[in-house]
Amino acid sequence: MTYGTLYGVGVGPGAPDLLTRRAIKVLRRADVIVLPRSSYYGESVAWKTVRTVARKPEEQEHLFLTFPMKRDPTRHKEAWDKAFAKIGPRLERGLSVAFATEGDPSLYSTFIYLQREAPIRWPGIRVMVIPGVSSVAAVPAVTGIPLADGLERVAIIPAGYGVTDLVDVLNRFDTTILMKIGSEMENIFEALRITGLTDKATYVSRATMPQQRMVGNIREMTPERGDCFAMIIVSRKERSGVLAGDVSPGKLLEKADA
Ligand SMILES: C[S@@+](CC[C@H](N)C(=O)[O-])C[C@H]1O[C@@H](n2cnc3c(N)ncnc32)[C@H](O)[C@@H]1O
């Protein structure tokens, strides 16, 4: 059977002009655009960007699918079974399907499960990933806080799934990005207090969107549940990123062996 191509399209962090030219091309040409949302009544954030380039509904199908944000994996499976039941027949009819994801499709995106399952359900299907500007790139841009330079190391943590090792992570990495904060704000604040990094943390919600909010002094914040489009960037800036001394890989290994 010849299936339609399945695309995972990164639509960027929110500002429509951060949509790439390749993403625009794929979204315009696709027969069906799939738009994930977190509840039946909630908005699809991806749609706010996609609608700026999508064709009219009579020319192209815009299929909204609900994926509740739950920690319980059985709830995810239920949503995915429903999604497959909708997407499958379209691919089997040879229609091209563009699955829009916020930011980049390869980072904590709903598309990753589809990317893994599609070749099992539809052997021989062509799956293509169109990269997008991730929130991990957008937040450093709007705050002016670089992600990493020189020797600096970066950790990306899906904080909402628990932050029991956060003190260790904050101590080991130069920059820590806390995504999907959910109800973990209080525990994050505590880890920042223990490590003495409270003043090095910046909270950003809805980066590049009209509702963008940045809090440089997070002591001002109450540890209520954060916005679901928020992250905290913690930048120690202790190594300053300058490549000083002899740091060739061989030398580092010698030191580790000593
Ligand atoms: C399910 S993950 C999706 C990440 C996305 N694939 C990406 O590349 O940015 C959702 C998390 O990304 C972060 N996020 C997404 N868009 C954001 C934005 N515009 N501003 C701040 N954080 C954002 C938040 O931490 C949010 O909880």
Image (cartoon, helix red, strand yellow):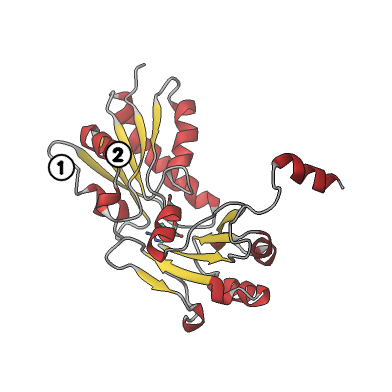
For label 1, the residue is 57
Residue 47 in sight here:
no
**Front tag of 2 and 1:** 2
Q: Residue furthest front?
A: 245
User: In the image shown, does 227 or 89 lie closer to the viewer?
Assistant: 227
User: In the image shown, does 87 or 181 lie closer to the viewer?
Assistant: 181
Ligand 1 in which quarter: bottom left
Q: Quadrant of residue 166?
A: bottom right
Q: Residues within 10 Å of mark 2 (few under 14, many from 20)?
A: many
Residue 147 lies, with reference to residue 10, above or below; the image says: below
Query: What's under tag 2, amino acid-wise?
Result: Ala
Q: Is residue 169 left or right of residue 40?
A: right
> Residue 108: percent from the left, percent from the top?
48, 49
Q: Residue furthest top?
A: 1
The residue under the point 25% across, 39% down is 24
Mark 1 CB in 8 Å range of ligand 1?
no
For label 2, the residue is 23
The residue under the point 48% across, 79% down is 217
Separation (CA) of disc 2 from disc 1: 18 Å
Query: What's under tag 1, amino acid-wise?
Result: Pro
Q: Residues within 10 Å of mark 1 (few under 14, many from 20)?
A: few
Considering only order in the chain, which callout, 1 or 2, is on the residue closer to the N terminus? 2
Name the element at disc 2. Answer: helix
Q: Is residue 247 left or right of residue 232?
A: right
The residue under the point 25% across, 51% down is 17
User: In the image shown, does 144 or 98 lie closer to the viewer?
Assistant: 144
Mark 2 CB in 8 Å range of ligand 1?
no
